[in-house]
Image (cartoon, rainbow, N blue to C red):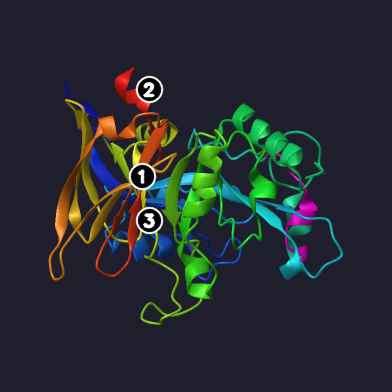
Amino acid sequence: MRKYLLPKEGRFYKANLHCHSTLSDGDYTPEQLKEHYKSRGYSILAITDHEWLNEHSYLDDEDFLTITGFELEVLEPTHLPNKQKKVCHINFFAKEQKNTTLFAFNPKYFWSGNREKAKTLKHTGPDDYERVYSAEGVNDILRLAKENGFLSCLNHPDWSLQNLDDYRDYDGFTMMEIYNYSSDIDGSYAYAAKDYDNMLRMGKKLFVCASDDNHDRFAVNHPHHDSFGGFTYIKAPELKYEAVINALEKGDFYASMGPEIHELYAEDGKIYVKTSPAKRIIMIPKGRNYNCVSAFEGEHVTEAVFELNDLEYEEYFRFEVIDERGRRAATRAYYLNEILG
């Protein structure tokens, strides 16, 4: 019996889940961002301005959907210069498009010129929630997010100077950025596969996305233009808010810098992966039972078949697809009990 790991029904929608506009520190208005991304084949955009929670449904049409969200910061309380401090940046996505009530609200996290205006924003809880840079502090914010109807994403751990000691006890993230294009443009280590594998091996179940984190300060043809490099393919039955959020909650998506994963399913003791032309398709488990299908020089592969028997004693596996330019696509972890149970 065939079991689809990425849903059979529906279609893939190309999404950027991390984006900044003139409402915080981006150079494009929300209207310009829609034009910018829709012209490049994107169907979904989450405008996640710093601390500003806005809904942009007025931009929606039958081919384009905005996700309501914002980016929140928790800053390490040291006397180091700001660029030396650790931070935890989290994107939150509202499960209801019209939900624009902030939580964990504290005006000191807004730019100084915006702090008075910030006090007029809708929020729950105290007027100056104390954000604590610790696992307990982050987990409390994640708790508030869940209570207030939001999904969560851990952003760019390397840019944030975070390591295993910081995130080993985080609990409750929906997903993390396995790739952040703006960090890549800046020269930071932007592909966070090791961080994801560390979390998985510690028993944390979360999904992965790839995002631009764009601010658009350079022209489109400039090498430092930070749009269109990291994106997420979301498989949903229709381009409706509830359907897309449901897909994000279930993990019906994958991260990419370019390669596409067309099908992913289990059947008769085997896992089948079908992709756009690639140089390598890799199965990455919890332990050392790695498996890889590679193309010969000058050739490509577009599918791979892996034996489930090779995963004896493993708990989960995930996939990466690498194209001839070195760009990667990455799936979430799939657990054997999901497939065999």
Residue type (three-letter) at the residue carrying disc 1? Thr
User: Which residue position is annotated with label 1?
Assistant: 331
Alpha-carbon span between mark 2 and mark 3: 29 Å
Q: What's under tag 3, amino acid-wise?
A: Phe
Image position, residue 244 (x, y; %): 37, 37
Q: Residue 203: x percent and y percent? A: 55, 33
Q: Does the rendering let one see residue 127? A: yes
Q: Nearer the viewer, mark 1 or mark 3?
A: 1
Q: Count neighbours of disc 1 (C-alpha within 10 A) and say few if under 14, some if 14 to 19, many if 20 or more.
A: many
Does 232 sit above or below residue 137?
Answer: below
State left or right for residue 162 relative to residue 26.
Answer: right
Q: Does the magenta segment cover residue 106?
A: yes
Q: Nearer the viewer, mark 2 or mark 3?
A: 2
Mark 2, other Cα within 10 Å: few <14 / some 14–19 / many ≥20? few
Does the segment drawn in magenta span residue 102?
A: no
Q: Secondary structure at mark 2?
A: helix
Q: Is residue 167 left or right of residue 288?
A: right
Chain part drawn in magenta: 103-112
Q: Quadrant of residue 82?
A: bottom right
- Disc 2 residue type (three-letter): Asn
Quarter that holds the N terminus = top left
Count of marks placed on residues = 3
Q: Specify which label sits upstream in the sequence, 2 or 3.
A: 3
- Disc 2: which residue: 337
Q: Is residue 220 above or below residue 273?
A: below
Measured as percent of width and height from the top left, residue 232 is found at 37, 50
- Residue indicated by mark 3: 231
**Residue 340 sits in which quadrant?**
top left
